[in-house]
Image (spheres, rainbow, N blue to C red):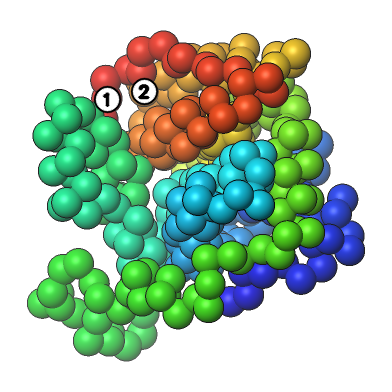
Amino acid sequence: MNLNLEHLAAQPDRDRRQADPIGAILTRLHDDPTITDLIALRESQPDLCDAAVKAEAHRDAYGWSASQADVSSLARIALLTIAGAHAMVVAIFPAASVDDVDAKVSLQPSQEWLANWQGSGDFARGRIALAAFNPGQATVPPRAETTVRESALYPWPPQGFDLAAEIDRLATRRIYTHEQLQVLSAFAREGLDMQAILEKARDYFSAADRLLKDAMRLGPMAHQTRLAAEGALIAAYLSCGQIAVWPARRGTRDRDAKLAMQGLVNGRAMTADPLNMQAAIRHGATFTSQVSLAEPRLFADVRMGEWVANV
């Protein structure tokens, strides 16, 4: 895996978009997606192990950059935002293989982190992170031959993927060149059209609900309709994930979009949506909530309201 985006400085417009992994997935959907489009998204299944490594590598680079005088606060914000976006991909997509399960488990907080949060009196944060990356609701399809790792007696959690070892293999925490970091700074400054993304999320949720009802009729297209419903639900939560991890720009309606997104996700607490998807958004909202204060002239501190206590 090559984390150093070698063409980032040469083609900034295209590669700034590529630095947003959620946006790259959602651009596969047309403005008015068909059943086929939604099924394709459901079955696209990105490499979750690769996304987990990129999430951790960007977060590690963010921590390292805080001590580097030549890395701007905007570039640091971009690093953490990209880390959050990759984490949302891991959390929201369902597991389709044991490797996907490994990827999700690798981003769960360690016992040491859980103890730190609980020691500070924050008992909910650890539960939210555990729920966000919980693969327990995933259905892993059977294979013709069961491997040792898929045996019912194989130790848990699976050890086929070592995230820490993958990060240690990286040559340096400087995963971008100085020129590329400048492009990332511009990327963070430009932000996203959160209001447009919010409207898309509402549309995807509506489509998911409608398609799921159609699938319950058990007609000849029930299986395909169910896949399309799941694709729409994934698109909806990915859209909310974008809004969650991105900082709110001053002089825009980003803050309103974030609060409206929270209300939208809270409303889904009364549905049968997978708990890990709902927890993912709450977890994602913590990524840039504090770091954006490093640029108070550009970004606003959005104090979210109460989340529905379903995690």
Q: Is residue 193 left or right of residue 157?
A: right
Mark 1, residue position: 310
Crowding at dot 1, Cα within 10 Å, few <14 / some 14-19 / many 20+, comes out as few
The secondary element bearing badge 1 is classed as loop
Quadrant in the picture for the C terminus: top left
Quadrant in the picture for the N terminus: bottom right
Judging depth in this view, the residue of 104 and 232 nearest the camera is 104
Q: Is residue 171 left or right of residue 159?
A: right
Residue at image position (15%, 52%) is 111
Examine the rendering and report whether any part of residue 240 can be seen: no
- The answer to whether 163 is drawn above or below residue 83 in the figure is below
Q: Residue 83: x percent and y percent? A: 52, 50
Examine the rendering and report whether any part of residue 3 can be seen: yes
Residue at image position (69%, 23%) is 298
Residue at image position (26%, 50%) is 109
Total numbered badges shown on the rendered structure: 2
Judging depth in this view, the residue of 153 and 197 nearest the camera is 197
- The answer to whether 263 is drawn above or below residue 174 in the figure is above
Amino acid type at mark 2:
Ala
Judging depth in this view, the residue of 151 and 60 nearest the camera is 60
Q: Residue 306: x percent and y percent? A: 36, 13
Which image quadrant is residue 180 in?
A: bottom right
Q: Residue 13: x percent and y percent? A: 87, 50
Q: Earlier in the sequence, mark 1 or mark 2?
A: 2
Which image quadrant is residue 116 in?
A: top left
Amino acid type at mark 1:
Asn
- The answer to whether 263 is drawn above or below residue 22 in the figure is above
Q: Tag on residue 269?
A: 2
Residue at image position (36%, 76%) is 165
Circles 1 and 2, Cβ within 8 Å, touching? The answer is yes
